[in-house]
């Protein structure tokens, strides 16, 4: 017997989309309706009340998968901003959304993750900062196409997957250039300590490319070390290398805070640059250059994109805007 799942597979859409077509929902594109109706006719599908009731339970639920940095001394506010932005937008659109922390999935295989999300009636995933080396099972599940997926700060566009991110390479190049140009304490020897994020991370790699491009253009002496987006690691690296460098550029605000704290403890001054534009930067005690991102808007856009994918549209790449900032304490409390 032909099921609604068979129709969805034949038409290349989600089960909920078939249900919407069967129940004459107004927000389904004409092209998608034609594909579903053509599949219904080709397969000889006859809907019944039981199938309709079952399919109506899958109402486009989205799972927001967040990775919280548990090794940070300070609370990382970025996941919370993603959560607020996604929940608020889902509520506005009448979509159902749940939050899942990556640590909950760390010991699961791709098949176990699939069963878990299916048991939660999830149709689409929004995954923040997916790592191909650290999240192999999650990557495998995303590639399987069992769920529509929106990746935040990770590549991988296909029929079922969209990617949302800023131009990290351009942003790192711009903020570092502005920082070095405006830093009066930056001497002519141009010795830079660059504290990168993760060794194999996509975002980290793009930001490093931007820094390397600038180093070549400005003839900088660039020492690159990996801080793993950790305040503590950045502190250690700063203690070790800063006395022999003229400036410190970090691939995240958390690492910039760690670097600044180390400089204060060593009682030496070096200009420090961050990346992300978090409010936490204002409490570092010094004004710092950084890259501003609207994390709430990015998450809201991801929710919208998840709805678009569930509706039968193909994946795409979306580049979000960024801005250069100088954050100080008064900016945070005002």
Image (cartoon, rainbow, N blue to C red):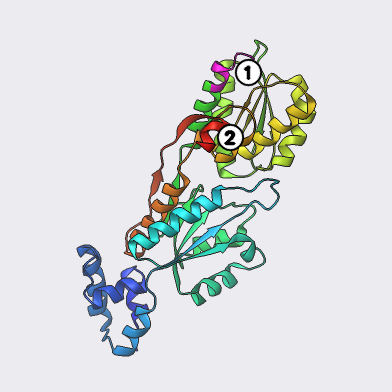
Query: Percent from the top left, x then y, of residue 201?
Result: 60, 45
The foreground one among 3 and 303 is: 303
Residue drawn at (76%, 26%), measured in percent from left and top?
241
Nearest the eye: 329 or 208: 329
State whether residue 129 appears in this view: no
**Foreground tag (2 vs 1):** 2
Residue assigned mark 1: 220
The first of marks 2 and 1 along the sequence is 1
Which element type, helix, strand or loop, lies under badge 1?
Answer: loop
**Badge 1 density bin: few <14, some 14–19, many ≥20, Cα 10 Å:** some
Residue 212 position (above or below residue 57): above
Q: Is residue 273 magenta?
A: no
Q: Position of residue 79 (x, y in %)?
A: 55, 52
Q: Residue at x 59, y 21 (%)?
A: 215
Does the stretch in magenta take in 184?
A: yes
Residue 220 lies, in percent from the top left, at 63, 18
Quadrant that contains the N terminus? bottom left
Measure the alpha-carbon separation of dots 2 and 1.
28 Å
Residue 317 x/y as whole percent: 40, 47
Q: Residue at x 71, y 36 (%)?
A: 234
Q: Which mark is residue 282?
A: 2
Left/right placement of residue 242 relative to residue 90 reads right
Q: Would you say 121 lies left or right of 287 here?
A: left
Disc 2 on helix, strand or loop? helix
Of the numbered discs in the image, which one, if any, rests on residue 162?
Answer: none
Residue bounds of the magenta highlight? 179-185
Location of residue 3 (image quadrant): bottom left
Determine whether 293 is above or below 86 in the image: above
For this orientation, the residue located farthest to the top is 188
How many residues crowd mark 2 within 10 Å: few (<14), some (14–19), many (20+)?
many
Residue ID at (66%, 35%): 257
């Amino acid at each position: 017997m032909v099921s609604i799942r068979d129709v969805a597979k034949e038409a290349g859409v989600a089960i909920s989309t078939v249900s919407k077509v069967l129940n004459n929902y107004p927000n389904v594109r004409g092209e998608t309706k034609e594909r579903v109706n053509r599949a219904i006719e080709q397969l000889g599908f006859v809907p019944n009340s039981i199938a309709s009731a079952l399919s109506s339970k899958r109402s486009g639920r989205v799972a927001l998968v967040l990775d919280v940095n548990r090794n940070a001394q300070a609370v990382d506010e970025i996941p919370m901003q993603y959560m607020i932005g996604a929940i608020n937008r889902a509520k506005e659109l009448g979509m159902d959304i749940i939050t899942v922390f990556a640590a909950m999935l760390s010991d699961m295989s791709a098949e176990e993750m699939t069963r878990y999300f299916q048991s939660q009636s999830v149709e689409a995933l929004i995954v923040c900062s997916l790592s191909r080396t650290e999240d192999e099972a999650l990557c495998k599940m995303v590639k399987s196409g069992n769920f529509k997926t929106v990746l935040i700060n990770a590549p991988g566009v296909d029929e079922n997957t969209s990617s949302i991110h800023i131009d990290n390479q351009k942003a790192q190049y711009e903020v570092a250039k502005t920082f070095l140009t405006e830093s009066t304490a930056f001497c002519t020897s141009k010795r830079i300590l660059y504290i990168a994020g993760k060794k194999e991370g996509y975002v980290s790699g793009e930001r490093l490319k931007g820094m390397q491009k600038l180093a070549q253009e400005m003839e900088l002496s660039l020492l690159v070390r990996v801080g793993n987006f950790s305040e503590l690691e950045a502190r250690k690296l700063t203690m070790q290398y800063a006395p022999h460098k003229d400036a410190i550029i970090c691939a995240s605000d958390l690492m910039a805070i760690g670097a600044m704290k180390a400089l204060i403890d060593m009682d030496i001054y070096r200009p420090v640059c961050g990346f992300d534009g978090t409010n936490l930067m204002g409490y570092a005690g010094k004004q710092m250059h950084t890259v501003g991102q609207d994390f709430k808007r990015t998450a809201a856009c991801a929710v919208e994109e998840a709805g678009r994918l569930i509706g039968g549209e193909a994946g795409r790449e979306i580049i979000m805007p960024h801005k250069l900032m100088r954050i100080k304490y008064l900016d945070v409390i005002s």
